[in-house]
Amino acid sequence: MRKIIKILILGGIHEAKRLAAELTTLPKVEIVYSLAGKTLNPNIPDCKIRTGGFGGENGLSSYIKNLKFDLVIDATHPFATQIASNAYISCKKTNTTYIKLCRKPWKPGIITWQSAKNFEDAKKKLMRMGSRVFLTSGTKGIQNFILLENKWFLIRLIEWPSSLPSLENFEIILDRGPFGHLKELELLENHRINTIVTKNSGGIFPAKLEASHKLGIPILMIEQPARPRGTLLYSLEETINWLNKRFNLNHTID
């Protein structure tokens, strides 16, 4: 009789939820889906859920060892570099198989942008760009961006940040995507946006970039950090194929 295969999925990208939904249908596979705990109302799969941090690399190592996971699937966001590093090192320490479900970064084509290496680089380049900025780079870096002089920011987030300076040069809207093309056009026009700052998160190409291109609004793109370590897989299908070969699952996606 085949033993139960225990898999820890470190969630963060949409593909992680789809993967968990696929794997929870399989007999002899036990999934624990981990959330960082930063989202108040997450759309989560129907499986065992763990929320909150692990307490760094040592805490994650202990969790993996104590629960005897056979595999860790790192499906965190491309910009979540600390947890990705902790996961990779923890799996090395505990002799646990590690794979990384990645998103290929968007590439410029008809729609082009100015690239920034990181948040600090983006801040410097933004100083020479438009004055009404649509900021969709998450909570990281907000404090630095909104301190720039002669700038007004429209900031879109999933939930309200824990702290912000007492300034009057920004407006926050709370919303969760995906967003349609017409809605993004209306948002940009109504707020007279003349610059967009966003992260190269990969995945489905966002309507905000298509809308900005149509309106002729310059885009400042914070590129993905350095290539992660470990076995890298770039789609749900590729990941399922890897799992089939490794654990003889014979699973197909409907």
Image: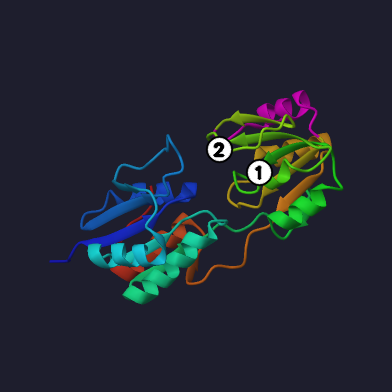
CB under 8 Å between callouts 1 and 2? yes
Identify which residue is drawn at 64% across, 59% down: 224
Pinpoint residue 162: horizontal percent, then vertical percent.
53, 38
Distance of mark 1 from mark 2, alpha carbons?
A: 9 Å
Pinpoint residue 167: horizontal percent, then vertical percent.
71, 32
Whether residue 101 is visible, yes or no, is: no
Q: Is residue 11 above or below residue 241?
A: above
User: Considering depth in this image, is 24 or 82 the residue closer to the camera?
Assistant: 82
Pinpoint residue 47: horizontal percent, then vertical percent.
29, 46
Q: Is residue 217 above or below residue 102?
A: above
The magenta stretch spans which residues? 176-193
Q: Which residue is mark 2?
A: 161
Whether residue 137 is visible, yes or no, is: yes
Q: Residues within 10 Å of mark 2 (few under 14, many from 20)?
A: few
Q: Which residue is mark 1?
A: 142
Q: Is residue 93 magenta?
A: no
For the view shown, which residue lies furthest in the left direction? 1
Pinpoint residue 211: horizontal percent, then vertical percent.
74, 35
User: Considering depth in this image, is 163 or 39 the residue closer to the camera?
Assistant: 163
Quarter that holds the N terminus: bottom left
Q: Residues within 10 Å of mark 1 (few under 14, many from 20)?
A: some
Q: Amino acid at mark 1?
A: Ile
Identify which residue is drawn at 42% across, 65% down: 87
Q: Is residue 189 magenta?
A: yes
